[in-house]
């Protein structure tokens, strides 16, 4: 009841006009940042790193993400390790797949290379790497080389 009296007192005290609501101008929920009640309203962008923030009615990605090429190379390396992992002591056919890496095709051991392919394409488009003029290895190799210090883990040649 007390809050209601305060509200009415404020409403009457300002002549019945209510100014725009107070907003924090931040967050990713689209609820802040603009006096029109819409905030950012649109779908937030996909940021390379970090989460988008709504400020003054506009979406923005963080600027201090570091070098995108370094981050993409790390993601490619992780994805590559997963695609080429194999078992050198297993009695099965392995290392029969092929995926396009940054400069050459590589032998893979199963799994879906589509995410890897997308990372490689994004890296090539964003970072424009220069490939050395050396010949690529023949693929698929059909060979699983053991990892150093491991009896059961390996990688496709």
Image (cartoon, grey):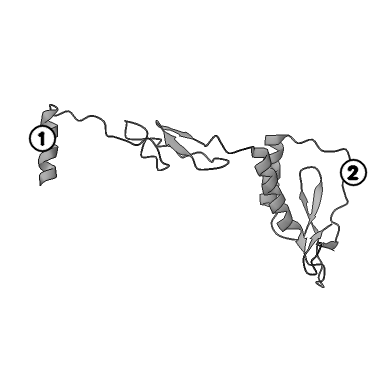
Q: Is residue 40 left or right of residue 14?
A: right
- For residue 115, above or below residue 10: below
Q: Is residue 73 left or right of residue 31?
A: right
Residue 150, position in %: x, y? 79, 66
Of badges 1 and 2, the one in the foreground is 1
Q: Which mark is residue 100?
A: none
Mark 2 Cα within 10 Å, few/some/many (few <14, many 20+)? few
Instruction: Tell me the element at label 2.
Output: loop
- Quarter holding residue 40: top left
Q: Quick one: which residue is furthest to the right in this view?
A: 135
Residue at image location 85% in from the left, 38% down from the top: 132
Residue at image location 26% in from the left, 31% down from the top: 20
Q: Nearer the viewer, residue 132 or 151?
A: 151
Q: Is residue 47 left or right of residue 76?
A: left
Q: How many discs appear?
A: 2
Mark 2 sits on what residue? 135
Q: Nearer the viewer, residue 67 or 72?
A: 67
Q: Nearer the viewer, residue 125 or 70?
A: 70
Residue 10, position in %: x, y? 14, 33
Residue at image location 69% in from the left, 56% down from the top: 112
Instruction: Tell me the element at label 1.
Output: helix
Q: How far, Cα to Cα, is label 1 from label 2?
A: 82 Å
Q: Which mark is residue 9?
A: 1
Residue 28, position in %: x, y? 43, 42
Mark 1 Cα within 10 Å, few/some/many (few <14, many 20+)? few
Of marks 1 and 2, which one's residue comes earlier in the chain?
A: 1
């Amino acid at each position: 009841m007390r809050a209601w009296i305060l509200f009415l007192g404020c409403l009457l005290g300002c002549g019945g006009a209510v100014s725009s609501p107070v907003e924090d101008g931040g967050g990713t929920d689209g609820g802040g940042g603009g006096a029109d009640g819409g905030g950012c309203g649109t779908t937030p962008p996909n940021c390379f790193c970090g989460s988008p923030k709504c400020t003054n009615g506009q979406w923005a990605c963080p600027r201090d993400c570091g070098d995108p090429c370094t981050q993409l190379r790390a993601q490619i390396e992780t994805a590559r390790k997963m695609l080429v992992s194999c078992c050198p002591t297993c009695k099965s056919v392995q290392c029969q797949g092929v995926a396009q890496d940054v400069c050459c095709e590589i032998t893979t051991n199963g799994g879906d290379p589509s995410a890897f392919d997308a990372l490689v394409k994004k890296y090539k488009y964003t970072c424009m790497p220069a490939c050395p003029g050396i010949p690529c290895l023949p693929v698929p190799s059909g060979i699983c080389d053991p990892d150093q210090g491991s009896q059961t883990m390996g990688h496709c040649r």
